Structures are given as structure tokens and as C-alpha cells.
Amino acid sequence: TPMQRVAPRFPDVAFEHCSGIVHLDNLGTFEAKYYEGTYVAGVAAGHMSESGRIGFVGGFPIPDIVGPANALLLGAQSVNPDVTCSTIFLNSWYDPGREREAVNTLVSQGCDVICSMTDTATGVQTSGELGAWSIGYASDMSQFSDKHLTAFTLDWTGNYLDAARTVADGTWVAEEHWGGLAAGVVKMSPYNEAIPAEVQAEMDSVKAAIAAGELHPYRGELRNQDGEVVVAEGEVLSDGDIRSMVWFVEGMIG
């Protein structure tokens, strides 16, 4: 990335890179635990889906996208173990035309809740036009559809302020920050009023349990698409394994 090239040229300047994976003495990174938000959203999907089939549209099949897709299904399966999730990757962050086609394909396959993890609101818009519920990514997308259930939003304020404060007081060091619900980096947007009150309460309970460390979306037993046990009963996937996840859980289609 440009920042990786520039940072070595200015060793006395502190750089912070969102979503970066390269660290230097003067280059730190910050990223979000997206999977915590998709798990909460998955609880809504599990309750609101009538077909038992949900869909996911992702930019690229990389761990930062594969992991949240898995967590979306796991959240839905915590409500209904028989739910499946069909997934389509665009191999692009921004391609509204292909995203629209992907949503059309998923809805035609019977998916009635769609989550899009791309850089557009096309997934939310198209889902609403086709009568399917939707889940937004990064920001509240309810303005684009009245079928928008919720969104897992991102708030980098804390990262920016911490970096500014530590640079100012001379204590800044290059670190890897990875925050979720507990840190306030991941937040859920307001819930659609169509979600029953008891389901909203369940979502809030799940959100609080994840933030408190009492519930982990990747607690075993977890099986992959081939039915092989990947995480044993009671064990939790390590942070390293989460951040390198390139396999789908059982029930994912794609």
C-alpha cells in the first residue's frame, strides 16, 4: 500500500493503517472484529427468515470477509440450527452491477435475508426492491430500504483519539489494534421496528454477552463444510486462526 512505501521514508512520523497487515517501527494498524456484529445480526436473520435460507455477498474471499460470513450463519443457527447461508463473492469492493446480480441470484434461490459486505448500499437497496430483508455493513443503511434489519457499523473515533493522544505525549508505539463491541469499534445500528420486541431484547442480550466475553461467536463445536470438527466442543478459535480463516462452517453454501 502507499502507506507501507511512505512510512520508511519518514521514520520520525507515526503512521496508523486501517486494515493493514504490515507493521514497522513507525507503522501501526487498526481493524475491527466484524464477526461480532454479524453474529448479532445473524440472530435477527435467524428469527426473521421464513425460508431458513439467508444470503451473503462479499467483496473478496479473504479472512476479514469469510469470518464475518461464518459468524452471520452461526448467529442465525443459534436461533434455528437448520438455517443455511448461500454466499457469492464479487472479487471487487465496488461493483454495483455485479452486486445487484448477486442479490438477485440469492433471492431467486430462496434467500430472504441478505447481508452485503461491500463498499456500496446496493445490496440493501436491491434486497428491499425484491422484498427481502437486509443487513448493512459499516454504516446505518436504513435510508436505502425499509427492509433493513440492522447494520454492524464501525466507529474508529477511539483509534484516532488514542493515536493523537499518544503521539502528543510521546508514548506512541506501533501496535496492532483489533477492537469489537466491547471497545465500541463495532456498533449495531437501530433495529427495524418490524423485529419483535423479544427478538430485539435477545439481540441486545447477545451483544452484551459478547462484549463481556461471556459468549464467543467461534466457540465449538464447529464443523467445516465437509462436516469435519474444526473447533472442539467448548474450545474457542484463537485470534490468529480467526484472522486467517479461509474455510466455511457447516451450512454455508458457496
Image: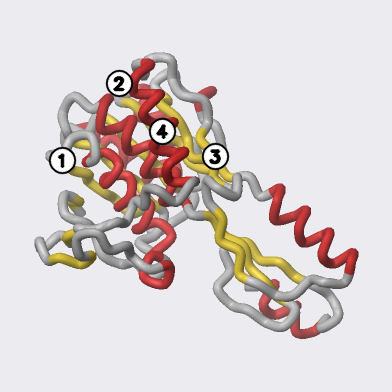
Question: Label 2 belongs to which residue?
Answer: 131
Instruction: Give how far apart the Cα atoms at labels 4 and 2 are.
Output: 28 Å
Closer to the chain start, of discs 3 and 1, is 1
Mark 4 touching mark 3, by CB under 8 A?
no
Left or right of 85, for residue 96? right
Mark 2 touching mark 3, by CB under 8 A?
no
| Colour pattern | secondary structure
Residue appearing at x 28%, y 35% in the figure? 104
Q: Which quadrant would residue 174 be assigned to in this image?
A: bottom right
Residue appearing at x 66%, y 72% in the figure? 175
- In percent of width and height, residue 138 lies at 54, 43
Question: Label 3 belongs to which residue?
Answer: 187
Near mark 2 (Cα within 10 A), the count class, few <14, some 14-19 or many ≥20, is some
Residue appearing at x 26%, y 65% in the figure? 247
Closer to viewer: mark 1 or mark 4: 4
Closer to the chain start, of discs 2 and 3, is 2
- In percent of width and height, residue 185 lies at 59, 48
> Residue 205 got which mark?
4
Q: Amino acid at mark 3?
A: Lys
Left or right of 147, for residue 73? left
Instruction: Give how far apart the Cα atoms at labels 2 and 1 are.
Output: 24 Å
Closer to the chain start, of discs 2 and 1, is 1
- In percent of width and height, residue 125 lies at 43, 28
Residue sitting nearer the eye, 2 or 149 = 149
Q: Which quadrant would residue 98 be assigned to in this image?
A: top left
Callout 1 secondary element = loop
Instruction: Give how far apart the Cα atoms at labels 2 and 3 are.
Output: 26 Å
Question: Label 1 belongs to which residue?
Answer: 81
